[in-house]
Image (tube, helix red, strand yellow):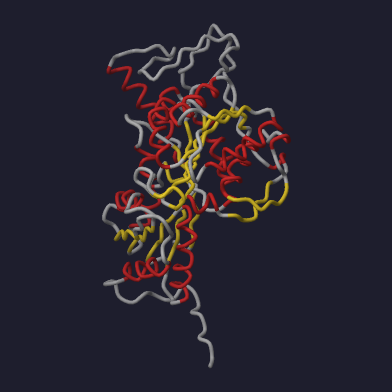
């Protein structure tokens, strides 16, 4: 279906990433927001608070992040699309209720504008140190979806994508922004409403007497209903059967948890989203995401100008991780270079997927600012070291200036 015109601010705007994220939420149909202010994500909440009265949305400033997460889970069962936003310490506090949302299979969106940590760390400065927490932060086995935009335009686009994925797979979806992208101001083009695809809630066609809230269909995702419309609903964080009733057996646990994993893992090929360049003949492949993908661009351009054969993968969907792509490339490339504003997180996934088929070089940064592109350039050079001279240049070297 197409976006509702009332929530779409069509036109060309000059927005920062936080505001663009808020506009993406409105375009996607978000009409409930609960949150607690925390730098550098507060601008998302402020924008939504100003815009919601014009579209009939409900905004609540909660007492903390735990309550914020709980509120959007309840709102989603009440029939609306809901989101919250946070950063570092707030993301940690939300983890228990994100797990509750996964167990109750609640579609919703959490935007995390990452800053330097741990603890309160660097409130106003960039980090990418929550990437593994996004995957493994809550307890138990589960699948999760996390997107990483690298511009304000992408903050708009990927927030819509996050809402669509959350509705399709009935799972909280994480928009893993970072402070640089959140506070970066660029041109953002918001299309006409009829150009924006929005996934509606998967409502059951069954009458109240026949509906089971956790009876999964062919893609392992149950249909929902709206609380208060005559259906009997039982939903809980406890292991449960198709009725939603608690069942404390190993058999019920196995059946439920395997389905929660499978609905993401089995559909990973449909969920994966990434950009690839020059992979066919690359000796070294730079794998990056978020603001680091833009910083890496200068290093990659310099390497190409020097005649090095460098490929690129920009992760848009970080979770589920595209292991198959890395595994296939590892068989025909010499090294992966993985710059991140952390001390090595997604690089561990690259290394696991490469399985020794190619070197994996981590270009770390503790946070507070972005990499010097020269450090990424040197890592690209290191990836070639010991493997002889690069093959035929993939790009014409830059001409030297004449005196």
> Residue 212 location in percent, x, y?
49, 13
> Residue 14 location in percent, x, y?
66, 53
In the rendered structure, the answer to whether residue 313 lies left or right of residue 50 reads left
Nearer to the camera, 218 or 10: 10
Q: Is residue 381 above or below residue 77?
A: below
Give the position of the N terminus as an image quadrant.
top right
Residue 270 seen from this side = no
Q: Quadrant of residue 361?
A: bottom left
Residue under the image location 60 percent in, 45 percent down: 19
Residue 93 seen from this side = yes
> Residue 234 location in percent, x, y?
46, 12
Residue under the image location 55 percent in, 23 percent down: 75
Q: Is residue 311 above or below residue 121?
A: below
In the rendered structure, the answer to whether residue 264 lies left or right of residue 352 reads right
Nearer to the camera, 104 or 47: 47
Q: In this view, does 319 lie above or below 65?
A: below
Q: In which quarter of the image is residue 227?
A: top right
Label total for image:
0
């Amino acid at each position: 279906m197409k976006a509702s015109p009332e929530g779409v601010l069509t036109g060309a705007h000059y927005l920062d990433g936080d505001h663009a994220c808020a506009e993406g939420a409105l375009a996607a149909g978000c009409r409930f927001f609960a949150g607690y202010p925390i730098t550098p994500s507060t601008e998302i909440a402020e924008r939504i608070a100003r815009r919601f009265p014009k579209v009939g949305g409900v905004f609540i400033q909660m007492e903390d992040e735990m309550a914020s997460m709980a509120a959007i889970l309840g709102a989603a069962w009440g029939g609306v699309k809901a989101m919250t936003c946070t950063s570092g310490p707030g993301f940690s506090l939300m983890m228990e209720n994100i797990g509750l949302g996964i167990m109750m299979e609640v579609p919703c969106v959490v935007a995390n504008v990452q800053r330097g940590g741990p603890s309160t760390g660097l409130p106003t400065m960039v980090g990418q140190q929550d990437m593994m927490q996004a995957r493994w932060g809550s307890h138990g086995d589960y699948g999760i979806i996390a997107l990483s935009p690298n511009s304000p335009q992408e903050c708009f686009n990927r927030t819509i994508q996050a809402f669509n994925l959350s509705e399709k797979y009935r799972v909280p979806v994480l928009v893993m922004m970072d402070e640089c992208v959140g506070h970066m101001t660029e041109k953002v083009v918001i299309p006409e409403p009829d150009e924006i695809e929005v996934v509606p809630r998967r409502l059951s066609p069954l009458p109240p007497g026949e509906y089971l809230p956790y009876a999964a269909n062919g893609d392992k995702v149950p249909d929902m209903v709206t609380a208060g419309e005559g259906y009997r609903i039982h939903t809980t964080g406890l292991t449960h059967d198709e009725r939603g009733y608690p069942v404390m057996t190993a058999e019920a646990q196995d059946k439920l948890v395997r389905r929660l994993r499978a609905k993401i893992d089995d559909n990973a090929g449909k969920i994966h989203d990434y950009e690839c360049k020059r992979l066919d003949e690359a000796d070294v492949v730079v794998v990056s995401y978020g603001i680091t993908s833009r910083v890496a661009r200068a290093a990659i351009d310099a390497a190409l100008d020097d005649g090095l054969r460098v490929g690129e993968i920009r992760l848009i969907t970080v979770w589920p991780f595209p292991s198959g792509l890395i595994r296939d490339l590892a068989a025909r490339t010499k090294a992966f270079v993985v710059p991140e504003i952390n001390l090595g997180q997604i690089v561990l996934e690259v290394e696991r997927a490469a399985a020794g088929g190619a070197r994996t070089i981590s270009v770390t940064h503790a946070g507070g600012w972005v990499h010097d592109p020269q450090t990424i350039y040197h890592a690209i050079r290191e990836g070639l070291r010991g493997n002889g001279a690069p093959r035929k240049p993939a790009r014409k070297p830059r001409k030297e200036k004449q005196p």
